[in-house]
Image: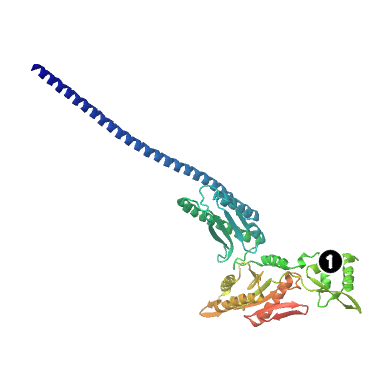
């Protein structure tokens, strides 16, 4: 019996030891599970930290790229901004700025094209500002390769903002990243606006400081500018200006109503040139014929058939028109309607009317006092010019009003008009003819008179 008790005790003890061992193992397993959970939490935290670090790295890298881009941007921008500030207005200054602007847009703003145009009357500015340039950025990473975004902005005359004198057009391939594309698109628009203002100021400064002196009262050009631009326009259509002295001499001999026989031309040429170079005369006649300034025919002279030469043309085209204005009874306004202050107001209002109805390429000048001139270059026809002048005349008649001490009167305008013709040697013949037309208009008041001239003198053109 005692043995059975001992055996039972051994069994119970071993059972308890086994249970204790199981409890110990379970405890260790539980501790390991907790350690695993803790490690998983740490791994998750480390993963999040790595993601944050990666994000910060990418942002830092992008910020570094943007910083370098901005540094380059300011470097190129300064190349035309600072140049504009440091140097006085000149054609060279404009040329330097244009080159820097094109480089800036194509290289720094990664635009694929830029075009700048100017449609004013200054040939040097036209040459400098007529620029087109492009660069292919499509192969670079980050660009979508889609159709270019096009940005257009007009250049205007600072003095007359209603007049468009040019245009800036920029083409740019969009970025793949929409956020970056939106931000960069706004940046490009701001830069084009900045360049627009810069160029408008440069053009205005050149016009005012180097090309002309504006009339302080009306804002129109003065007589000095008239002589310069009228000469430029005259020479651009005139064949006389391209002839040398001897060619001019031969043409002068031939000019006239009737054809001149060769023998007469030869004798007069020899007498005036004090030589007998018939080969030179033949060469000159051939050149004048090639320019369509003279034509040759055969006719009798002293009962002998001989070559005759006739003058037929001296202009490349006839698109240059000049109009002269005079305000009717303007002295009466100064004397009896409020003095010179009122007269100045009338002149200012008249100049404003003129600016409203003429083209950007037309040149309005205050000749002096109450006389004005407009140069219409590259005009389509006298009919078109007449329509413009008639509109100015009508508006003056209806709205150029003077009020003084309860009284009211309108101020009308008389207008003379002429067109360049084949007999004009210089601008003085053109201005004399338009002055004659104005004289005829002033006799009637508030009228337009067009005048031309031939070998018999002036004649009125009926419109």
Specify the farthest residue to the top.
2
**Residue at the spot of label 1:** 284
The residue depicted at 70 percent of the width and 81 percent of the height is: 460
Is residue 52 shown left or right of residue 230?
left
Q: Nearer the viewer, residue 125 or 53?
A: 53
Q: Nearer the viewer, residue 132 or 218?
A: 132
> Picture coordinates of residue 202 (x, y %)?
60, 57
> Picture coordinates of residue 422 (x, y %)?
75, 73
Confirm whether residue 282 shows in the render. Answer: yes
| Image quadrant occupied by the C terminus | bottom right
Q: Nearer the viewer, residue 29 or 104?
A: 29
| Image quadrant occupied by the N terminus | top left
Q: Nearer the viewer, residue 145 or 185?
A: 145
Is residue 216 shown left or right of residue 178?
right
> Picture coordinates of residue 398 (x, y %)?
55, 79
> Picture coordinates of residue 396 (x, y %)?
58, 77
Mark 1, secondary structure of its residue: helix
Considering only vertical position in the picture, is 137 above or below 281? Answer: above
Specify the farthest residue to the left.
1
Considering only vertical position in the picture, is 21 above or below 237? Answer: above
The residue depicted at 28 percent of the width and 32 percent of the height is: 33
The residue depicted at 68 percent of the width and 65 percent of the height is: 229
Q: Tell me which corner region of the image, top left, top right, bottom left or bottom right, holds residue 40.
A: top left
């Amino acid at each position: 019996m005692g043995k059975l008790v001992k055996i039972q005790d051994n069994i119970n003890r071993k059972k308890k030891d086994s249970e204790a061992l199981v409890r110990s193992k379970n405890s260790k397993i539980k501790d390991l599970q907790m350690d695993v959970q803790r490690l998983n939490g740490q791994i998750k935290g480390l993963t999040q930290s790595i993601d944050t670090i990666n994000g910060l790295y990418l942002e830092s890298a992008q910020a570094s790229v943007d910083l370098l881009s901005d540094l380059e941007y300011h470097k190129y921008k300064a190349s035309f901004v600072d140049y504009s500030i440091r140097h006085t207005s000149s054609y060279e200054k404009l040329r330097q700025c244009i080159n820097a602007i094109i480089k800036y847009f194509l290289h720094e703003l990664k635009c694929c094209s830029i075009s700048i145009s100017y449609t004013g009357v200054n040939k040097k500015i036209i040459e400098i500002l007529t620029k087109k340039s492009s660069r292919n950025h499509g192969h670079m990473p980050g660009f979508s390769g889609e159709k270019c975004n096009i940005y257009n902005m007009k250049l205007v005359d600072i003095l007359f903002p209603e007049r468009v004198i040019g245009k800036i057009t920029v083409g740019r391939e969009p970025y793949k990243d929409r956020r970056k594309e939106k931000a960069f698109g706004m940046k490009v628009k701001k830069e084009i606006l900045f360049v627009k203002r810069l160029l408008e100021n440069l053009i205005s400064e050149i016009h005012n400081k180097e090309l002309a002196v504006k009339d302080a009262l009306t804002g129109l050009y003065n007589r000095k500018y008239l002589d310069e631009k009228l000469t430029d326009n005259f020479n651009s259509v005139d064949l006389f200006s391209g002839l040398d002295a001897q060619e001019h001499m031969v043409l002068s001999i031939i000019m006239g109503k009737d054809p001149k026989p060769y023998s007469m031309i030869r004798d007069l040429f020899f007498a005036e040139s004090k030589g007998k170079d018939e080969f030179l005369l033949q060469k000159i006649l051939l050149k004048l014929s090639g320019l369509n300034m003279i034509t040759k025919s055969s006719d009798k002279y002293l009962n002998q058939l001989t070559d005759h030469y006739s003058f037929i043309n001296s202009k490349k085209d006839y698109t240059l028109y000049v109009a002269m204005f005079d305000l009717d009874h303007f002295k009466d306004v100064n004397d009896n309607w409020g003095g010179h202050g009122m007269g100045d107001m009338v002149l200012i209002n008249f100049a404003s009317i003129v600016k409203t109805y003429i083209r950007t390429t037309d040149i309005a000048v205050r000749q002096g006092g109450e006389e004005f001139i407009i140069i219409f270059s590259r005009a389509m026809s006298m009919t078109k010019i007449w329509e413009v002048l008639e509109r100015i005349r009508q508006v003056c008649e209806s709205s150029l009003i003077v009020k003084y001490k309860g009284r009211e009167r309108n101020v009308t305008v008389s207008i003379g008009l002429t067109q360049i013709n084949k007999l004009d040697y210089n601008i003085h013949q053109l201005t004399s003819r338009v002055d004659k037309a104005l004289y005829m208009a002033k006799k009637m008041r508030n009228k337009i008179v067009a005048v031309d001239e031939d070998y018999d003198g002036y004649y009125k053109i009926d419109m």
